[in-house]
Amino acid sequence: MNAIVILVLYIFIFYILRFWFRRFRSDAAIMALNVSKIPALIVSILLSLKLFFVSLGTSQLLAQVQKSFSAIIILTVTFWLVRFMTEVVVYYLVDFAEKSEAQWDDVFVPLLQNVLPVIIYITGGLFSLQAFGVDLTGLWVALGGAAFILGFALKDILGNFFAGLVLLIDSPFRFGDVVILGSGKQAIIKKVGLRLTTFYVIDQHCDLYVPNNSIQSESILNLSRPTAHYYYTLSFPVKSDADPSRVIQLMQSVILAHPDTLGNVDHKLQMLNEYFGMSEEPTKALEKREAGQLRLLAEKEVNALLAKVEQGFDDLSDKIARMEDGGLDKEEIRNLQRVFMDVCQMIGMEVLSDRLVRSKRVWLEESPQAIAAEGALIGLIRCWYQSWLKDPDLLHEDRVQLPKYWEQKINLLKIKMNKLFVRVNKTSSDDTRLDDAMTSLRMWMQENFKTTRNEWQEPKIWVSEVQQSERNFSVKFYVDDITLEHCERGVRIKSEVNRELTWQLRRSYLSL
């Protein structure tokens, strides 16, 4: 009878449930069943045999057979657990990290793949020996003592290991960030390992390995946060008899004319043809000017629609905040849902449902019609970064990484929109935090997705020092993304701006 129950459960789990799981969008359940099928079959057979031998009575031989079955069951479960961790859990952790802002996959995943299976095999082997009847009391004591001795002897290594875990949980940087170390070296975060953090030193083209414990006590200047825009400063001497207002106006025009500096897009487009590339070879300057103009026009469209989306979230948040005082009735909730769907349409998302599932799951997905017909935000973002790829200064790795970077951001936006969509559709009359969710998503879009150009990003110029024969002007401007061109984009742009300013000032007889 027990064997029949086990058989029925096996057929239900691995055949009937499989058919049901195929309706899900994720194949996690199917993968788990595939990994579990053979181990479950072995365990089912052994359990049936154990129950059969129990019915035969008790004897020393039967007891030894029972212990053998128990040991084999433990080994089978151990083997299954390792496969489940490496083929199911690890796979989805990597997939989750790629679609989210998680930064621990480079360390946590190798830890699961390489270290955890060894620990599981050793533990499972010891428990199987114990189930077989081997007395392991002395061995457990010996292992405890050895663990204490090893922990004391390897305290530095263990300290670096736990420091690495802390760095991943409370991370001051992301992989790929450009930082300045305490020594003054500019480097890229490559990897947080089990014991060491690896930095790529840009100027010396080499890897620098720093113990994780040292990272915690070192001050690190992160140039990639809060954004990959970096502030550069130049100093220019100008004749003291030159009109300062004319000098400042000329400098601002030259800096804004460079397509890779930040500033008001409309002003940049006005200055691009007049001031950019005058000191460069004409053919190269024309190619860069055309590529820059194409990118700026695409970004202008993105910024305009992004501002509307942000305003839509602000209006929704304000409306919800006003309504929450008296509670939301059904008509108000339906109205909010309609307005929210209007914002979704601007982003380029529509409602889809799975009618094969009884629960009729509903979620948001990209709307090809909205993206193609109305120029939705997702489509405009893609047009923008594709126009960016025509920049002649980009390297091959940039043309690979730039689309990947923005597609990851688009996926994050879709995930966050789906979470908010569920929240909006489950709104009740006593919900008092929906406006906070709206504000949170709006802030994420502004800080982590794509910011419209702000006033603080405009180039700034002022007189820093006045001497008898000259004035020194300090020039400060932002570069769009210093991580591009193998993290040397800022250096190139700074050099080009310096050259253009010198050429224009000399042409205007304003410099020494």
Image: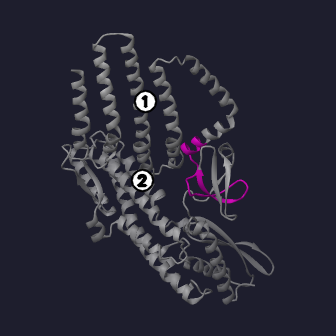
Q: Nearer the viewer, residue 235 or 15?
A: 15
Report the residue at 54% width, 46% height from top.
107
Mark closest to the chain's N terminus, 2 or 1: 1
Q: Position of residue 19 (x, y in %)?
A: 22, 43
Q: Name the side, left or right, on which 310 lies relative to 53.
A: right
The C terminus lies in quadrant: bottom right
Report the residue at 52% width, 45% height from top.
110
Residue furthest right as drawn: 468
Q: Check disc 1 and give the amino acid type.
A: Leu
Q: Which residues are magenta?
A: 164-191
The N terminus lies in quadrant: top left
Q: Check disc 2 and give the amino acid type.
A: Lys
Q: Position of residue 125 (x, y in %)?
A: 49, 28
Q: Nearer the viewer, residue 432 or 425?
A: 425
Q: Position of residue 457 (x, y in %)?
A: 55, 67
Q: Which residue is mark 2?
A: 99
* Residue 75: mark in rendering: 1
Q: Is residue 445 above or below residue 96?
A: below
In the picture, residue 234 is in which quadrant? bottom right
**Is residue 450 visible from the viewing direction of this image?**
no
